[in-house]
Image: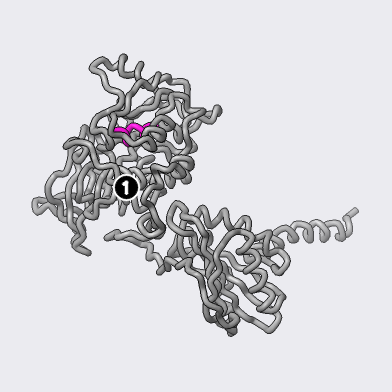
Amino acid sequence: MENKSNVLMQRYELGRVLGQGTFAKVYYARSLITNQGVAIKVVDKDKIMKVGLMDQIKREISVMRLVRHPNIIHLYEVMATKTKIYFVIEYAKGGELFNKVAKGKLKEDVARKYFQQLINALDFCHSRGVYHRDIKPENLLLDENDNLKISDFGLSALVESKRQDGLLHTTCGTPAYVAPEVINRRGYDGVKADIWSCGVVLYVLLAGYLPFHDPNLMEMYRKIGKAEFRCPNWFSPEARRLLYKMLDPNPNTRVSLAKVKESSWFRKGTNSKNMKSEIENKDVAPISAEAPGPSENSSLAAEAKQEPVRPPNLNAFDIISLSAGFDLSGLFEKDSLNREARFTSRQPGPVIISKLEDMAKHLKLKVKKKDDGLLKMDALKEGRMGILSIDAEIFQITPTFHLVELKKSNGDILEYQKMLEDIRPALQDIVWVWQGEEEQQLQEQQPQQQQQQLQLQPQEE
């Protein structure tokens, strides 16, 4: 609870008010543990209970824990008392992007930078089955390095919110930024609706004012429904083409996020250095139970010829530590089992290495050999969370028996899981058994053995 000295639960010292709404106040605060600045959203329980918004608060918490991305405001922790709920979130020192646009249009290169970060973060949300549904400059914050951060997931929806027709039906959002199909109340695709809102944001960044505006709300809705807008003469031809594709009133023909990222305007001036995202679990949380391991942003430069990789030998303790039955990482990492895969092989080391290299070539991965039986495989294209990088480490148990571990060292976890689906069949010639399949085989065999035992038992007369 708050006390006279403005110390919250002996963990945060509350400072000035950053913002205030109907049901909540947002304070600047300082962690007494790390001295880090944070923002704390204080929600009044009684007020949200009276208007039936408790489910919305729970959904917001679930969503913010699901979408961890460098360009999304990070939720550090949630605390509660009998009367209040406290969201401890990342503090965006630069304030709202709206404040910049309110001073006038942005230079095209500046607008492009913010737009790229918005699209990359939103694409990440959609890959997690999350639709924001209220994208606007007021919900786009800037940190001390002028990087964009999407905030306010209070109106967001999860993929589970879809009805049997596969569409969302809750009408929500800010009128000037809402898609025409949302206004029509006939069901809408959350992805397509978010793309429309991003198109409006792009227009605002480049023009300094809204594409659809009218004192009469119904007249503004009519303009939105027919996509009646004009681009100022200072808009470049590439920006115009992209905007007309994003602000297509027909959601079925509206451009996808993938096509937006492929457009010439979006890609202009980008390179692998300034577009590379931070790794998935990099955060500066003052209170965090998770301790992400180190990662490497591997280089795709041409490599010199190296000596053959020599797999390290394993002793008995090493083998025990790599056994699934003795793996304690699940106590500390929620998705540890998703980050690595292991298999055993009866093939000699050179054969395994050759097969891994062939597989990487087939899947368009760049291979870089390192010492001690380690191969590093990098995707050639930027993913949602930077370059996907997979480490393949080979351990020698006997001269003709090896353990191979595949582990994601950088990039998006879902892209890694999808890549694994292609890797498994590509390696079937050298795999004896994948870790985890032994238990599954035993479980499948056990009922069969029990059935056989029952059949062999003599029946009592």
157, above or below 388, in the image: above
Q: Is residue 315 left or right of residue 115?
A: right
128, above or below 252, in the image: below
Q: Considering the numbered disc 1 on the image, is that residue within a helix, a strand or a loop?
A: helix
* Image: magenta residue range: 196-204
Residue matched to label 1: 113
Residue type marked 1: Lys
- Magenta segment includes 17: no
Residue 314 seen in this snapshot: no
x, y percentage for residue 47? 24, 33
Q: Is residue 312 left or right of residue 432?
A: left
Q: Write the residue at 72% across / 58% down.
A: 444
Viewer-side residue, 143 vs 211 = 211
**Prevalent SS, magenta region:** helix
Which color scheme is applied?
one colour
Viewer-side residue, 92 vs 212 = 212
